[in-house]
Amino acid sequence: MPSRYIHSRLSSRQIPDLLQTIFVAELINPSQCIWLVSPWLSDIPVIDNTANTFLCLEPAWSRSHIPLSQVLTTLATQGTTIHIATRPDSHNHTFLSALKVRNNSTNCHIHITEELHAKGILGGGYYLAGSMNFTYNGITVNEEAVIYDTSPETIAEQQVIFAHRWGQ
């Protein structure tokens, strides 16, 4: 089966929509493991629950924009192993602190590396990679080039690369 992918410059509205779709799909059918790799991370909103649209996915969520740390914590409590690779930059401390407070280190592994430049998110059935950091500017302001790939070959290859690079 040929690889399905999107490879284009996405508007500031398309990237948040794609991320919301990825995370809603994860909440419906969680991956065993998710890798989030980004030199700079912020606790960006990734699911718009202002109309209680996703109440069935997590009844405890408020009518608000659900931040990345909260979605990852929900996935971790459902049994997904979360690996986050980032730089030891002070910008990342707020996100990592929010994740630690919410998650209490359950199924969550942080990998800090000074030379990190790769960016992407890898789950059991997809790989999103490109120029986008997981920050407000990365998903809403900057013009980014990303690839969304669902081919089993690409996913398997990236799982091996990520596990070899940061350990699993």
Image (cartoon, rainbow, N blue to C red):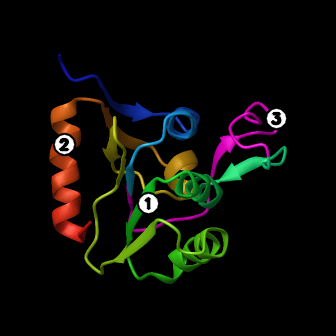
Relative depth, front residue between 6 and 72: 72
**Which residue is pictured at 29% across the width and 30% down the height?**
150
> Any mark on residue 156, and which?
2
Q: Position of residue 167 (x, y in %)?
A: 23, 69
Q: Position of residue 94 (x, y in %)?
A: 61, 76
Q: Which residue is mark 3?
A: 52
Crowding at dot 2, Cα within 10 Å, few <14 / some 14-19 / many 20+, comes out as: some
Q: Quadrant of residue 126?
A: top left
Relative depth, front residue between 148 and 13: 148
Query: Between tags 3 and 1, which lies in front?
Result: 1
**Which residue is pictured at 66% across the width and 75% down the height?**
101
Q: Quadrant of residue 36?
A: bottom left
Q: Secondary structure at mark 1?
A: strand
Crowding at dot 1, Cα within 10 Å, few <14 / some 14-19 / many 20+, comes out as: many
Q: Secondary structure at mark 2?
A: helix
> Any mark on residue 119, and which?
none
Q: Is residue 10 left or right of residue 164?
A: right
Q: Position of residue 19 (x, y in %)?
A: 52, 40
Q: Earlier in the sequence, mark 3 or mark 1?
A: 3
Q: Which residues are magenta?
A: 36-59
Please identify the quadrant where the C terminus is shown. bottom left
Q: Which residue is mark 1?
A: 82
Relative depth, front residue between 106 and 40: 106
Q: Earlier in the sequence, mark 2 or mark 3?
A: 3
